[in-house]
Amino acid sequence: MLARTLPHALNQDLPPGEYEVVVVCDGSTDGTAEFVRSIRSSVALRVIERPHRGLAAARNAGIEAARGELVLLLDDDMFGQPTFAARHIAAHNDGFDGIVIGPLRSAPESRSGLATELVRRSHNEYHDQLAGQGPMRSAYKIWLAANFSAPRNLLLNHRGYDERFSSSEDQEFAIRLWNAGVQFRFLPDAPVYEIYSKSAGQAVASDAPRTGKADVQLARKHGGYRRASILASLIGESRAKLMLWSLCCIPPISPDLALRVPCSMAESLSANSRIEQIGLRVFQYRRAIAIMRGAMREAGSWQALRREFGMRLPVLRYARIESAQSFQAQVRWLARRGYAAIAPSQWLAWIRRGEALPDRPVLISFDCAYAELAESALPILLRHGFRAAVHVVTAEIGGTSQWDRESGIGPQPLMTAAQIRYWAEKGIEFGSHGRRLRHLSGLEADRLADEIEGSAADLTRVLGRPPLSFLYPGGAVNDAILDCVRRSFEMAMGDQPGLNALCTDLYRMHTTAIRSDHRIGNLALAVELGRVSLRARNPVVVNAVSSPRTQPVLGHSCKLRSNEHAGVR
């Protein structure tokens, strides 16, 4: 491969004395080092031989051996145009001392096949996205594998690649640099081309399991990555999908065996575009299964993987407690079936750091902080060791529910500040339902801030600490509301039914509206499926999403906002 790519590196539009080429042989036994030494070039060319220790160690060795102030990394199957190195240098000449990333494209001479086609599409999608969005917005969507340049001392000062990673070491390094405040810049006019030579079978058998293992390691090292992980996307939100993955992962023999023949047949007939699309989908299934099984091996078991990445959280949202006796029966039913009611802070701790949750968690939420809760519902929960969330209309603390006047019920007493503090000490968490229970859509910016941020300030004065959660009045959400809520709260709940999972947007959490006089069958549906009736089905949407490892994997319809995990940089 180097015979094809190395001449491009040695023939850049730069004076020969202004750059060098360092080739690292990571345990190679095919004569690569001897081939490199046989080349005569006016450009300084060095080869470093070392025992096989993986890509991370090889890249670190090359960075350490480099003599220049800037380093530009490539893999041995990549080549660029004569101007690409000069363009990288020019990008740093304006005083920019961060990371410059160029596009990676598939070379025309790449091996024909499904794996190559998937790589090509993923390369194009990723770099088109970078070119279109301006400043890079997320620490978790950057990969420092090849065609990037940086000051050598910058990479050394941040300890280089983590050599414990056998895959995804490029993404781990990017996260670490981003978190340290390093700047990133995309350079669209400096592409390099990869001669991809792996078959679909090789990509599934070797690359995919290592990707699954590395995804677990990456999520453990960088908790913020958990929600952007491949595993979060694959596992999705529904219990049905979780069950399907268990059937793919637990048996000793992988279901990939049943997909090899149709994948191979589709590849041989890929000249037909429709058959190629079918083949790509089958290949994505194969790759996703291998990723999940690799992740399971790293986690230790299917149950360990489920507890770390696949928990489901139903949120039961009660507007009122119509009958304390019926509510007690519902709580007793939950406890007998192994459910444990948690607080919002516990869900956040699992999302962000993977802290352990009960095996069958449920979140019980109450609207408006009616005083009746302190007399009936909260004592019932306390007797069962359950926690809950109560969302307060903060301008009416200690007052009455004037909004109930129109419903015919009449204003009802609301919890006082003293009651809120008392129950907060017992483990009940209090969030905001707005200041005056107004519909937020359509409010001007200052009134919106008063309703949302003002309610956070009200509760902070009562509790002595900022509240975590917000419950959208009427369920209305738009971009202005979301931006305002993000400034004051760490999570928010809407009125869309469903179950919550690792990939669920923390500011659009699903809730299931339920009444204390609902039948136990409705309650069972609510905790298992996220709805109280089988008639209103929430379809599970399965689609192909781009994987951070350059090839799309089969994913769920969960989508993360690009700026959700980090500020614009």
Image (tube, rainbow, N blue to C red):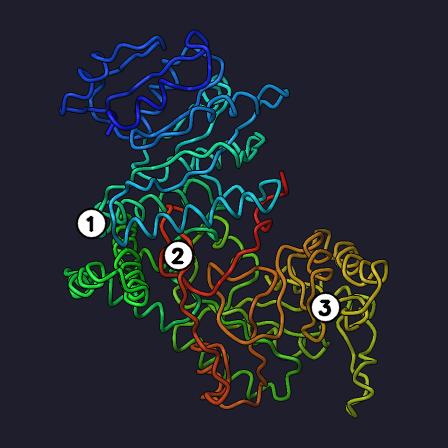
Classify 10 Å Cα crowding around label 2: few (below 14), some (14-19), many (20 and above). many
**Circle 2: element type:** helix
Specify the quadrant that holds the N terminus: top left
Q: Secondary structure at mark 1?
A: helix
Nearest-to-viewer mark from 1 and 2: 1
Foreground pick, 17 / 23: 17
Question: Image point 46% across, 41% down: which residue?
Answer: 222
Q: Which residue position holds label 3?
A: 433
Q: Secondary structure at mark 3?
A: loop
Q: Earlier in the sequence, mark 2 or mark 3?
A: 2
Task: Give the spatial CA distance, label 2 vs label 3.
Answer: 30 Å
Q: Residue at x 61, y 40 (%)?
A: 135
The dot on residue 205 is 1
Mark 1–mark 2 CB contact (< 8 Å) = no
Q: Which is nearer the N-term, disc 1 or disc 2?
A: 1
Q: Picture coordinates of residue 172 (x, y %)?
A: 42, 37
Q: Is residue 450 above or below residue 523?
A: above
Point out residue 493 in the picture as x, y percentages from the top left corner: 62, 67
Q: Nearer the viewer, residue 426 or 556?
A: 556
* Residue type marked 3: His
Tag 1: amino acid: Ala
Q: CA distance from mark 3 to mark 1?
A: 51 Å
Other residues around mark 1 within 10 Å, as few (<14) / some (14–19) / many (≥20): some
The residue identified by callout 2 is 309
